[in-house]
Image: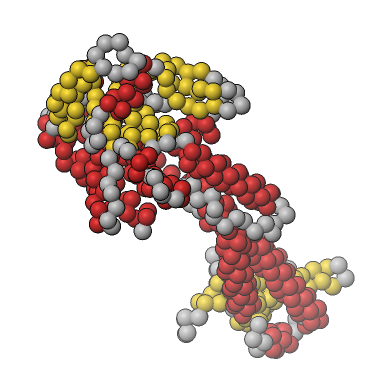
Amino acid sequence: MGDDAPESGRAMSQQTAPHRARPEAAGSRTPARRSWMARIRRIPIAYKLSLVISGLIVGCIGLLTLLIVQHQHQLLQVQFDNLGNTLASQVARSTMEPLLAEDRLALEVLARNLVSDPQVEGIAILKPDGTVVVQAGLTPMDAFPGRDEAPANWQGFAWNYRDPRNAVRLDLVSYSQPVRVKQVVAGQVVLTLDRTSWNRAMHQAQVHIALAGILALCIGLLLTFYLGRRLSRPIHDLLDLGRAIHEGEYRKQPFSIRRQDELGDLMQTLNRFAEHLEHKDRIEEALARYLSPTLARELVKSEHRPRLGGERVEATVLFADIVGFTRLSEGMDPEAVANLLNRYFAHIARACQRNQGIVDKYIGDCAMLLFGVPHHREEHAFNAVCCALSIQALVERENEVRARAGQPPLRFRIGINSGEMLAGNIGAMERMEFTVLGEAVNLASRLSSASTPGEILVTEAFLQRPDVRGRVVAHPHGAIRLRGFSRPVSTWIIEGLTPEYVRTLEERTERLWWQSLRRTA
């Protein structure tokens, strides 16, 4: 509670601080770029694996398709060239005799018969000097009249022709073969073939190959995505278990180890790790029932063995003792006595924990609470006062319940004192306990014994502490003599807190009461 005022003060100072405009950094695009890089790095492993394998599949299928298309193109080209050279050679042999006999009519008949073939678009029979003897159909000499080429240079010449009648584009190839008579060149034959149908067939084959490649690519991508998800599933299971361990859910269903690879070993290791943490959590939970949760965590996390001894600290001790409990418990069963103590001590424990204290021990019908140990807190004395007032309010609520049930009420005598004391482990190496010792502790115990039922008794020096002065309402009780102290002690009775803290304390006590009702329901 004592931290509320400083926090509100800081909030006010932040609100009244003058507004300062922040200049934009020169490299404002750098954070955005880094953000994109971070998003790319956060892509799930399944997608990364799918992208990598998909890239390999695309590359392999694309390269394979390219090689097949090129090989098919070369194969068709070779076959077409073989066909053209074979036909040109046959025509050269057929024209040998008519050409030697200068039988022009026979040569024209031969040329017309050849041109009637759908694949043959033209033929030209030339003399050795290049003079055209007979010509029919489309020939490169007519298509390229300005090109002065030797007849032999038309061998394998590829060219295009667009028919003016139907605007059809023809892919043509001309082949040249000499007409030889006993090693003497008697002329030259230039045969032009139509390669359009061959190119169309090759294009269709390429389309089919590409479609087959795309189909294989799609199947490969689907299989890749499926395999990526399947391979990354155990990784997601590992992440879920790691997240559960981080959040303290050690009792999460462990892995069913079916794998015999590295992931299986990792799953088995994580299962053992989760079991170890669960065991450690159970130990800490069990210790917290006998010690304060703070001490239990310290013992579990400590890397050193506990040892006897302690250190001097500035802390606060609170003793809460039930008035007349011995007389009240006469005639009660031990179980009923234990239940009665447990019900009231539960209120004390919750009020102590809510006000940053620890329960040191229960001594019969008395509870000893510590504030400021084992971890020092600046407002340990004020926290003890708030705890005592909460205990009084909770006890009054509990007494109202007992009154409705026709049972007698219980009253507590509370004594609080602060000062220097020795905090540490007391006892033997075989059996020790954490507690505090010193004159300040003894004085708190004597104050509890000297107070009247329902009162909180403190010393005048306690009220002058910086964290208590001006925040507590109290009236003097007078100087009293206490056993074990030679001089009278000036004492005061705490009535409550100053108005600015009353509402917060009441709300806190109300929440503690409803928590106790839920736990006992």
Query: Residue 424, position in %: x, y?
Result: 47, 22
Name the residue at the top extreme.
486
Q: Tell me: 193 left or right of 494.
A: right
Q: Quadrant of the C terminus?
A: bottom left
Q: Compared to 226, does 501 lie above or below?
A: above
How are the colours assigned in the image?
A: secondary structure
Residue at image point 52% right, 77% down: 169
Q: Quadrant of the N terminus?
A: top left
Asked whether residue 518 appears in the rendered view, the answer is yes
Query: Residue 234, position in %: x, y?
Result: 60, 56
Q: Tell me: 70 left or right of 327.
A: right
Q: Quadrant of residue 413?
A: top left
Q: Compared to 520, does 298 lie above or below?
A: above
**Closer to us: 495 or 207:** 495
Q: Compared to 233, does 78 lie above or below?
A: below
Residue at image point 56% right, 46% down: 278
Query: Residue 176, position in %: x, y?
Result: 71, 70
Q: Compared to 308, does 279 lie above or below?
A: below
Query: Residue 108, position in %: x, y?
Result: 68, 86
Residue at image point 54% right, 75% down: 161
Asked whether residue 28 appears in the rendered view, the answer is no
Q: Quadrant of residue 223?
A: bottom right
**Closer to us: 488 or 246:** 488
Name the residue at the right extreme.
182
Residue at image point 73% right, 54% down: 260
Q: How many marks?
A: 0
**Closer to us: 173 or 469:** 469
